Image (tube, helix red, strand yellow):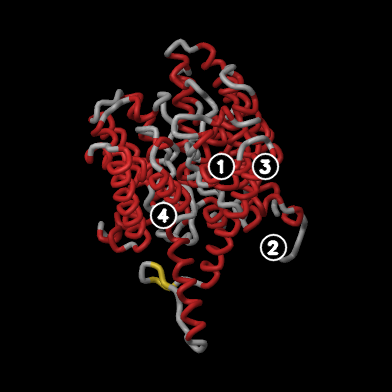
Amino acid sequence: MNRRIVAGLLGYLTLFCGAAMLPPFILAATSEEFNGAAAFLLAIFLCLAVTFELERFGGLRGKDNIGTREGIAITGLGWLLISILGLIPYFAGGYLNLLDSLVESVSGFSGTGATVINDVEILPRSILLWRSMSNWFGGLGIVVIFMAIMPQFGRGGMFILKAETTGPTKERQLPRIRDNAKALFSIYVALTTVCAGAYFLCGLSPFAAINHAMTTIATGGYGIYNGTVGEYGNIYLEYCMAFFMIVSSGSFAMYVVACRRGIGVIFRNAEFRTYLLIIIVAAIVVASDLILEMDIDPETASRAAIFHVASLSSTTGFVAHDFDTYPPLSKAFLLMTMFLGGCAGSTAGGLKVARIILLFKFVVLIIRQKLHPNLITQLTLSGQPVDQDIVYGAAKFFFAVVVLDILFAAVMMFDGIDFVNAISVSVSTMASVGPGFGIEGATSTYALLPSLSKFCACGFMFLSRLEIFTVLALCSPSFWQKSKNW
């Protein structure tokens, strides 16, 4: 691995992080939030200092190539470094202790949206903006956004894109890597802008509209009120949010292709159609259950069902009502949508619908081959053949998620949390949802978790956002050894 290249690009990333802190710093300074302004000024200074040290050690040259190991190192270490630098405003401003600052930062950048702050309404607007920005930068991907706005930094950028983007398939829509990243980023910015405008028309203030638009499109879920969406009591806003959460759960690569070939691409996409079907079925079941079991009127039940199915399936985690009080059947369906997540290539977390489709088809194929041993066939997704490696990759990822869910739950039970709450927190964290049921229910926070569980939650959120294997490869001793096989 070429450590010079890794250090050089990490230096650019930390510089990018410092630049991203300028808007909240300016907001704090102009709003006379002197404590917040000092905290962001210190954070920016530290970003510049780290940049200077990294650039002194590393750098890029004209013919540099980024290989597999460089791509993994830049992505994994970049996310870790940005998350650490991102905690400085919380800690330096005296708003949180060091561990809680780390949890808040990792949760923000990973798009989990789980907070350790019991009362976010006492925070200054600059910190609220930084929380939302961390969601937004982490949603599409720190490195993808970095690739889109920074100059070309050498060949081999596909390895970085593969290490950060989510889902079993990672095709390019445009020939050049940077053009691909710019197209994804353009769609991301356009959706955020439209979403902010829609929220403003629904009655939100400009500041609230911008913050909620960033966390909606990033499917992060950070809000500026303790009751998040329920604070507004706005029917139109809930439907509008549900729409944009569903849109954000679709593949952004699919939207890039749709801009070039027409909107029909979206409706021909098998994964997105399946995702919509899951939402419709889950919403009907939850609404019916609320009407029958809780005697809620049909309009309110339907609105609550649509909103929370969209919120949890997209892993955004916005809350309009306390779904922890819902009947068992409703909670079971909400937990299922939380576990499945959105589409591959979206900002949503979870397993991804594409993997579920592939694994289901794979099981059917195995059964058919048992009945017809000489059968030769190939799996397809949206009419396109899928390589066997991708199918096996989906199976490996499913196994890894289940194992890590169990492992994290075991850690929390060791830390004194009961079985049901441990499972709920584990699934919610690994799916990058944030709120769940029980100890970190719809109206609760991660503040109730013991210190060991909070620290481990940071690791598991990190694993989940980079889809496990990038981080595991980075932690492998052989990764750092010289080898001719790389």
Between 235 and 153, the one lying in front of the other is 235
Which residue is identified by label 2? Answer: 486
| Camera-side mark, 1 or 4 | 1
Disc 2: CA contacts within 10 A as few (<14), some (14-19) or many (>=20): few
Residue 56 spot, x, y in % from top left? 69, 37
Q: Are marks 4 and 3 in contact (CB under 8 Å)?
A: no
Q: Earlier in the sequence, mark 1 or mark 4?
A: 4
Q: Secondary structure at mark 4?
A: loop
Disc 4: CA contacts within 10 A as few (<14), some (14-19) or many (>=20): many
- Give the CA separation, mark 2 to mark 3: 34 Å
Disc 3: CA contacts within 10 A as few (<14), some (14-19) or many (>=20): some
- Give the CA separation, mark 4 to mark 3: 29 Å
| Camera-side mark, 2 or 3 | 3
Disc 1: CA contacts within 10 A as few (<14), some (14-19) or many (>=20): some
Q: Are marks 4 and 2 in contact (CB under 8 Å)?
A: no
Residue found at x 37% / y 46%: 248
- Give the CA separation, mark 1 to mark 3: 13 Å
Q: Secondary structure at mark 1?
A: helix
Residue found at x 47% / y 41%: 433
Q: Which labelled disc corresponds to residue 411? A: 3
- Going by the numbered disc 3, the residue's amino acid type is Val
Q: Which labelled disc corresponds to residue 343? A: 4
Residue 107 spot, x, y in % from top left? 54, 36
Which residue is identified by label 1? Answer: 420
| Camera-side mark, 4 or 2 | 4
Q: Is residue 436 visible from the viewing direction of this image?
A: yes
Q: Earlier in the sequence, mark 2 or mark 3?
A: 3
Q: Quadrant of the N terminus?
A: bottom right
Apparent side of residue 473 relative to residue 231 in the rendered image (left or right): right
Apparent side of residue 223 relative to residue 405 in the rendered image (left or right): left
- Give the CA separation, mark 4 to mark 2: 31 Å
